Image (spheres, rainbow, N blue to C red):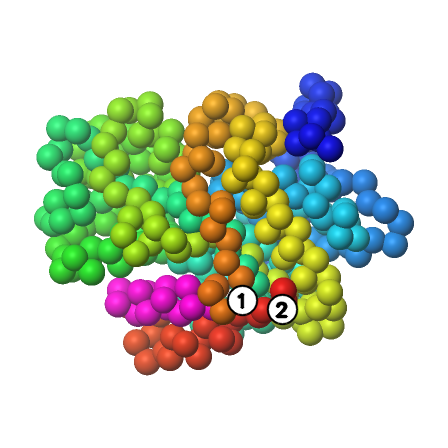
Amino acid sequence: MNPIDELAPFSPPRREWLRKTALAAGAAAMGGLSFGLPATRALADEGSKSLKLSWNAGAICTAPVPVALTQGFFRKRGLDVELVNFAGSTDQLLEAIATGKSDAGVGMALRWLKPLEQGFDVKLTAGIHGGCMRLLATKRSGIVDLAGLKGRTVGVSDMASPAKNFFAITLRKLGVDPDSDVRWRQYPANLLGEALKKGEVQAIADGDPTIWTLRESDHLYEVSNNLCGEYANRVCCVLGVRGSLIRKDRAAAQALTEALLEATEWTANHPDDAAKVFSAYAPNADVGQLAAMLRSHTDHHHPTGEAFRKEIARYADDLKTVGVVNAGTDSDRFASRVFADVIA
């Protein structure tokens, strides 16, 4: 079937239904998850394996999740997948997955690895893509590279956010102490742009779509991103699956992982169509900008197996340099513990 034809079900009534469903997810909470009115799912064949997949419906980097649903990648592997819009902390999400309230989730490696170090029974099975974190400054600030942040204040949405962790790591590698040479100040994500305009901070760091939209609307300079240098081929978004599901039903974990990998590749090859799919969950977003964001991400890079395990170990090494992961943690052993090769 032509990929464009597969988007035909997105008639206005269908799009409106999906929009309302996405907005409704969050009406009720269970262990940090929003189960709401019926969560988004596709019609499944009789006998399909039912799974719950947690995701952040407001993050464009998770676009492969609804793509897998709407393009039938779950269904063709015998899965009936319910998408659960996650609304709690990372610890709550990982606990929900580990305890069976959800079966799997998609999130950011630089936020997940610390709580995974604490022993949650969740295994990372694949990388989804790289890109989507950016650090911006005004053009008049004179900040043209990360070294220019020395003595400056950077606004972030969370002191443990992936963007804060990433740019702290890269500053450390440049010889700039992210704790003593740079000040970090926390704001709600939607106020980062205002903080920059008021001069309360000299730079801001966050993820797409927030940071991309601010760059475009406020004509900001992109000082750096997480596709520079050694990170050009490093994933930031990962898939985690409940450990007990892998042990008891490895075939289901494999099918889920393969479906998301196929959806990620489809997203890379059809960014305009993927943006249309995702726009059902972001009714106020500009589809053209969503597509541009997807083109800037590395959805062609979605490692599994040993290649993915090594990327986890490298991130663990990085996080040790900024005090997020314990200095005594053996990164290679840690990566082997939190990773599962369900594709082999």
Residue at 56%, 45% (x, y): give it: 265
Query: To which residue does mark 2 refer?
Result: 344
Structural crowding at the residue carrying mark 2, measured as other residues with C-alpha within 10 Å and reported as few (<14), some (14–19) or many (≥20): few
Q: Earlier in the sequence, mark 1 or mark 2?
A: 1
Q: Would residue 102 be visible to someone looking at this image?
A: no
- Disc 2 is placed on an element classified as loop
> Compared with residue 175, is residue 88 higher up or lower down, i.e. above or below?
above
Q: Residue flagged by tag 1: what amino acid is it?
A: Gly
**Is mark 1 in CB contact (under 8 Å) with mark 2?**
yes
Q: Residue 180: image x %, image y %?
A: 14, 59
Relative to the observer, which residue lies in front, 71 or 237?
Answer: 71
On screen, residue 140 versus residue 29, left or right, reads left
On screen, residue 54 versus residue 72, left or right, reads left
Mark 1 vs mark 2, CA separation in Å: 7 Å
Residue at 52%, 40% (x, y): give it: 268
> Compared with residue 180, is residue 267 higher up or lower down, i.e. above or below?
above
Structural crowding at the residue carrying mark 1, measured as other residues with C-alpha within 10 Å and reported as few (<14), some (14–19) or many (≥20): some
Residue at 26%, 43% (x, y): give it: 224
From which residue to which does the magenta span run? Answer: 309-322
Q: Residue 47: image x %, image y %?
A: 88, 54
On screen, residue 85 versus residue 317, left or right, reads right
> Compared with residue 123, is residue 19 higher up or lower down, i.e. above or below?
above
Relative to the observer, which residue lies in front, 344 or 85?
Answer: 344
- Residue 255 location, quadrant: bottom right
Q: Magenta segment, principal secondary structure? A: helix
Query: To which residue does mark 1 refer?
Result: 305
> Per the image, is 317 magenta?
yes
- Residue 65 location, quadrant: top right
